[in-house]
Amino acid sequence: MKIAIYGQYYHNNTQESIERLLDILLQKKVDVCIENDFFNIIKHESETFSRFDAFNTFETLDNSYSLLISIGGDGTILRAITYVRDLLIPIVGINTGRLGFLATIQTNQIKAAIEDILNGNYKTSERTLLSVTTNPINTDLEETNFALNEIAVSRKNTTSMITVETNLNSEYLTSYWADGLILSTPTGSTGYSLSCGGPVITPDTNSLVLTPIAPHNLNARPLVIPDDTEIQLKIDGREEHYLISLDSRIATLHNSTVVTIKKAKFKIKMVELLKESFIDTLRKKMLWGEDRRN
């Protein structure tokens, strides 16, 4: 088995977890490759790096990998998918961040979880992604034009709202007068969209959700649509530019740019332990329906 390791930080909150993970993989004698920048961070910060200097590194992935382990928070997983792309390499997240809705393995579960995964005792959940194209073409979005959580457009360099003219399958829906608009996948429905009043959608639902950001239209509410819908956005505002974000990656577009968003042609596989489920994670991490009277 060939395993890729990806992370972004090596500090007090992550040091012990990273070294514990690498020690376990050394003991199991699996083929391990660490993302090059992350490898250099560990090499610089770890006082016991000599234990791991035999590990190989990678800058890109290929079909020879059986698994990618992301160690960090949910944001680290969102970065990790830019390496996995359409390779269908399963991703598992070890949570050294805060909420950890995607990175579900806690630091005190690393040994048992890795043993289960190496023994094949896990399941995978396929997650829909979004892809974006722009007219005219924006070179900043060409290489990684996809997102696992959401694609959002928002105002830039102004406190004034923007107008987001929205078409669904070439049919005019409305013009949102707001700070921006979020188009979220089911995976992203528990993130930014939820914070703006959007609904939670289970990962296996074939839907997307349009959620306006601080709309001035009082009758503008989140809208759930089929995931085969093509969404076209045209932005207008007092400033000449606006922002578009794909998960945590941001680019600046001119108001003349038309954005087209649709379901990506590939999916991401998320590893889940057999005793885990989305419903269980929702209840534990979001305290879903918790009531002190109960």
Image (cartoon, rainbow, N blue to C red):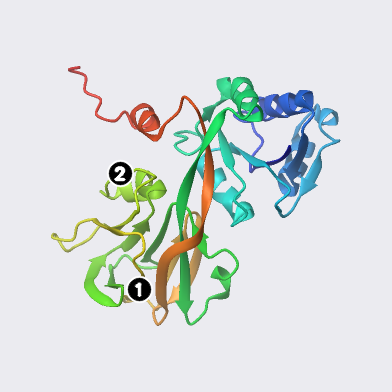
Question: In this picture, is 167 found above or below 95?
Answer: below
Question: In this picture, is 240 found above or below 290?
Answer: below
Q: Which mark is residue 182?
A: none
Question: What amino acid type is highlighted by mark number 2?
Answer: Val
The residue wearing badge 2 is: 200
Q: Position of residue 93 (x, y in %)?
A: 56, 36
Question: What amino acid type is highlighted by mark number 1?
Answer: Gln
Left or right: where 33 falls relative to 156: right
- Seen as rendered, the residue at the extreme top is 294
Taking the spot 64% from the left edge, 42% from the top edge, the residue there is 68
Taking the spot 31% from the left edge, 73% from the top edge, the residue there is 169
Q: Are marks 2 and 1 in contact (CB under 8 Å)?
A: no
Q: Position of residue 42 (x, y in %)?
A: 74, 37
Q: Nearer the viewer, residue 137 or 227?
A: 227
The residue wearing badge 1 is: 232
Question: In this picture, is 1 found above or below 226?
Answer: above
Left or right: where 178 falls relative to 152: left
